[in-house]
Structures are given as structure tokens and as C-alpha cells.
Image: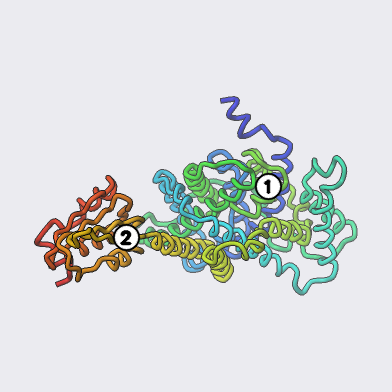
Amino acid sequence: MLQSLKNTWFFNIRGDVLAGLVVALALIPEAIAFSIIAGVDPKVGLYASFCIAVVIAFVGGRPGMISAATGAMALVMVTLVKNHGLEYLLAATLLTGVLQIGAGYLKLGSLMRFVSRSVVTGFVNALAILIFMAQLPELTNVTWQVYAMCAAGLAIIYLFPYVPKLGKVIPSPLVCILSMTAVAMYFGLDIRTVGDMGELPDTLPIFLWPDVPLTFETLAIIFPYAAALAVVGLLESMMTATIIDDLTDTNSDKNRECKGQGVANIASGLLGGMAGCAMIGQSVINVKSGGRGRLSCLVAGVVLLLMVVFLSDWVSQIPMAALVAVMIMVSIGTFSWDSLRNLKHYPLSTNIVMLATVAVTVYTHNLAYGVFVGVLLAAMFFANKIGHFLYINAELDSEGRQRTYKVVGQVFFSSADKFIAAFDFKDTVRQVTIDLSRAHFWDITAVAALDKVVIKLRRVGIEVHVLGLNEASATIVDRFGTHENPEAIERVLGH
């Protein structure tokens, strides 16, 4: 047990603590902004970020990944808050957690294996674009000092790592935030700060059961939102976990992460916070700053709460320009620049899936829509491609009485028509043998195609023999096939 604790909590103490500090500072304006998007008080987002980050550090399945209140989840909540108020949002948050725990026990995290690499790349690129776009309001209609601070912040972020000794010890985003805050306070610059985004809470969160009637009517109101929140939260968390897996060259337990997200959201709802999920921006900041273990997420959550409650006067002085510089660094580091260079070399279908995922996600600002479109297109292209890998060779014996069809490849809904078209139903032979020893039947569409071929040939007086079905194909054909049932002939032929 001690070895397990060391391997997940205390193997990278300095890196995790420093990375957690950077993430905590970056979480504050985002949590406030997401609260404003959802239409709730800033403390709802801040309490949620603290609670989710602390809980997920213990129960999550991906060490080093940061979870908190997110923009994707906030967008789903807007209508619920507007029509029914905060209490119903808290109830929906609790139900979201229950649904996510259920998804974990149903092992829905394993469905990530159906998400192709091109969809993940499109998801990453779309998030990078959205992160950058989210910074634009802070860079429009502002004074030159803001641009200067932002440029100086980026210079520190990218150049400080080259400073001997210190550059490898202290995360450059932390240096950027601290130094830019000091400069702004010293010169008394009139620029937008964290304090201008909303009032920071001055008390610790307390246990709070949602004040809603426990009726079926309440369930009917919150269930659609809870289901949407659960799906969006799990999608973003699973995709983010996959990206962090790649960045750190480690594996994560996706099903445990589903359960962990659920537990964290239940805790958030009971402490007056809104639902959240994994954050790719903060997760990348954490990894880039040296965070690898569970300690970094715990430090981020605890420091966030301590800063907004006990150090709010100092935190409110942090210039938004410094945090914008950090988020621009995140967007640049998150974007897969190789995907642009590979457009010339990758298949057209792969490029279409990636670009469609990016376009839909950026246009709708909804990650679930983008991933859904990407997965759907990838599945369609794959089915079309595999459907072409079907070869049927017809051989006539020397006497001209028997024709053998040798089928090689996959027979399913995409290739069923091609399978049927390969047979000559006006043939004059007496006997037809269908050799399926090198073929595989996948679904009932394929079985129906075999039925149609066999029955049509028998209707014209040809004796048909089906040979070589492998065990899996024979099982589905025996269960759903009808060509051995004379009564089914008319039904199969559609007469």
C-alpha cells in the first residue's frame, strides 16, 4: 500500500506542488467566467472547481488530469438556470453524478476504443481554437498596456525555461503570473484584473441539499439536463484522459474515471457547486508545468480555495493579461501542428473526419456534437472501405454443370449488395456451390443477402450448397437465416 501511495502521490512532489499552484491561479478566472456563462453567482463555479479537483484527486482514474467547472458543461446549464433557478441546477448536478457512476459500472469508458485517432486530433485542435477564441474578449478594445503585458508574459513563458538552473525548476507560467502581477501593482496600471470579473467568495463552502420538491415533476425537469451534462462531461473527460495519456506516455483507467467524475459531481452539488468535468487547458498546463501525480490536482483544488477565501485581496490584483498569456501558451501547445503538415500525406477520409470534428465543435461550441459527427463519419468511411474488401470468384467445372462461387472478405450491411450482385440468377447450371471458407458474415443484413441468393437460385431449379462457414458466421446464419425454411421463401423475396 505504501508503495502504491508513493507511485501515485509522492513520486514527483516538487513538480506536482508547483504545477498545482499554476493551475490554481489559472482556474480562478475560468471558474468565474463559466459561472457567468451559466448564469449563476461566481462562487458556484469556484466552489465547484475546488470540490471537483479535490475529490477527483482521490477517486479519479487519470493521475495528473485536472477536473473542475468547464465551459462545455456551463453551456448545457444555461436554460435550466434561466427557467428554474440555482436549486434545480444543484439537483441536476447530483443526478449527473449518479448517471456518471452508473456509466462507470456499465464500463462505458471502454467505448473510447471506438473513437478514431482522427477524431481525437480534431477534438484537440477544436479545443485549442476555442481556448484561443475565449481570450479574444480580453484583447479587444483595450489599452496598449494590455498587449504589452500579454507579449511580455508570453516572452517569459517561452524564454524562462532557458534560464540556467532556475528555468528547469520553476514553471514558467507561474513566473509569468507572479511577475506580471508585481509589475501591474508596482506601476498601478489601469488594466482588467481577476477582481473585475466578479466578487470572490469570503466563506468556505457548506453542505447544501437542493431545495426542490422530491417529485416526478422535478425529475422530469432535471433529467434531460442531467443526461446531457453526464454525456458531455464523460466525453470531454475521456478525450482529455486520452490526450494526457499520450503526453505522459502512461495509461489510465477510463471506467474508474467515469465513476470518479460522478462522485466528484455529487460532492460538488452537495456543496453548492455546479457540475464539471476534466479540463484540457488546465490539464495541459499541469503537465507542461511538471505535474504528473494525484498530488498536483489536490494542490490545485486546495490552493484555489485558500486563495479565493483568504487571499482574495491579492488574487483580485492578478492582471487578466498574464492569464491570457498562459492560456495562449496552452492553445499553441494543445494544437496538433503535425495534423496540418500531414494533410498532404493522410487519406482524404482521415482529413475529412478531423476537419469536420474541428468545424462542428468550433461552430457549435459543443464538444459532444463535434465528437459525435467525427465518430459517425469515421464509422461510415470505415464501413465503406471494408465493404470494398470483398472478392467473389466464379468457376465452372469442365462439364458445365456446376459453378463454384468462392467468397473472400467481409459480408455486412455495406457489402451485402455487392455480394448479391456477384451471382448469376439466370445461370443454366444444375448445381451451385457457395464456398464461404474465406468469408465472414457479420450481421443480419449479410444473412439476409445469403438467404436471398440461395432462395433465388433454388427458385430457378438450381441445387445450392453452402460450405465453409466459420463458427461465428455459422452461428448467426443458423439463428437468423431462413433459406432452409421453405415457408420463408416468399417473405424473403418480398412477394
Amino acid at dot 2: Asn
Q: x and y percent of residue 226 in the render? A: 44, 57
Residue 25 in view of the camera: yes
Q: Is residue 485 above or below residue 205?
A: below
Question: Disc 1 and disc 2: Cα gap in Å?
Answer: 58 Å
Q: Residues within 10 Å of mark 1 (few under 14, many from 20)?
A: many
The nearer-to-camera label among 1 and 2 is 2
State the SS at label 1. Answer: helix
Residue tagged 1: 286
Location of residue 28 (image quadrant): bottom right
Q: Is residue 188 left or right of residue 434?
A: right
State the SS at label 2. Answer: strand
Q: Point out which mark residue 463 bears.
A: none
Residue 75 in view of the camera: no
Of all residues, the one furthest to the top in this rendering is: 2
Query: Residue at horizontal 59%, vertical 49%?
Result: 67
Location of residue 58 (image quadrant): top right
Q: x and y percent of residue 320 in the render? A: 75, 61
Query: Residue at horizontal 22%, vertical 58%?
Result: 397
Q: Is residue 396 left or right of residue 119?
A: left
Q: x and y percent of residue 442 in the render? A: 32, 54
